[in-house]
Image (spheres, helix red, strand yellow):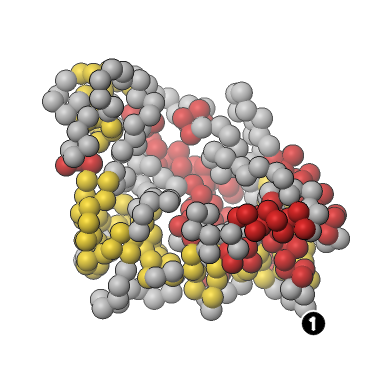
Amino acid sequence: MAKKVFVGMSGGVDSSVTVALLQQQGYEVAGVYMKNWSQDLPGMVCPWKEDYQDAKRVATQLGIPFKMYDFEHEYRHVVVGYMIDEYKAGRTPNPDIMCNQEVKFKLFLHAALQDGADMIATGHYARIQDGQLLAGVDSNKDQSYFLCRVTEEALRKSLMPIGAYEKPQVRELARKFGLATAEKKDSQGICFVGKVGIKDFLQQYVQTEPGRIIDQHGRDVGEHDGTLFYTIGQRQGLGVGGGLPYYVVGKDMHKNEVYVTTDLQDSRLWHSELRLADIHWINDPPKQEGTYMVRTRYRAELLTISSLKQLQDGIWHVVLHDEVRALTPGQSAVIYEGERVVGSGIVI
């Protein structure tokens, strides 16, 4: 008897092709739209209804059952609430990682299994092999970074068929299958509210005060509109004109000051060591004799780790072979062994 797989359908081309591929592979497939966010924001209509209709259209085309799971209440708490709290604390979080950890591979997985599924599937560009998470074949679209906090238990009940393809191939498959979403553009911006920028989103929930922007010489060079809007290494959106470009190298939430530099070799921009909290290993912890790499933000280059060890307080200390630029508190540092994701921690 064919295994029953519930596919998380976002209304995009990737999850649409996921359904078609699984059908081709002989699975009994059902589609599920996860309603995580429906609130409109000033100047931005939430695209959830359009996405839901696109997903439903593809499900009808492919002749599969289709339903919606409403996770909006939980999502506001575990993803949006977390994100706002992190920004308020002066850190730069990654809501996509939290969404995968708490919603797609926990809430959705549990609800699907309760609903009669044997497994779930998503349109992620990553691969699963014997309970291990591997990078996607398409290095330009690889999403393994965002899946770094998924558990081995969840991976053993999940499928990611498009991880074996490159994006142009997925588009071609969508056309070949005649899917309604074949030419639909990829979504941009915050994972749950479409094209709205993070600053525009945060301004709906957080009160901020203008403050001073101070350069590497201690000079006042401008005014910011809220310390929490700025992240380490940022160049755009500072509003400080003339001369060499400025880069954010630090901020003080209590003094309400943002610190910048025009010196690309400024020591505050470069680090050869990092400390990681809230560690999550997908399978087993790394071994002392292993060869590991780390990625400190999505699409950043992989850096060789010289030393990786646990300190007494549960913090892990990572020494790099080369320096990393713009290390950002709150971001996830994801550790790889070859193509395999070993786990991750939060930069502190």
| Residue 87 x/y as whole percent | 39, 38
Identify the residue at image location x=25%, y=20%.
243
Q: Residue furthest left?
A: 217
Identify the residue at image location x=48%, y=64%.
135
Residue 230 in view of the camera: yes
| Residue 13 x/y as whole percent | 69, 51
* Mark 1, other Cα within 10 Å: few <14 / some 14–19 / many ≥20: few
Q: Is residue 21 above or below residue 98?
A: below
Front residue of this view, candidates 91 and 287? 287
Identify the residue at image location x=34%, y=31%.
235
Left or right placement of residue 264 versus residue 53 in this view: left
Image quadrant of residue 295?
A: bottom left
Q: Residue furthest bottom?
A: 1
Front residue of this view, candidates 227 and 242? 242
| Residue 120 x/y as whole percent | 66, 66
Identify the residue at image location x=73%, y=49%.
182
Looking at the rendered structure, the kind of residue marked 1 is: Met
Residue 254 in view of the camera: no
Q: Which residue is mark 1?
A: 1
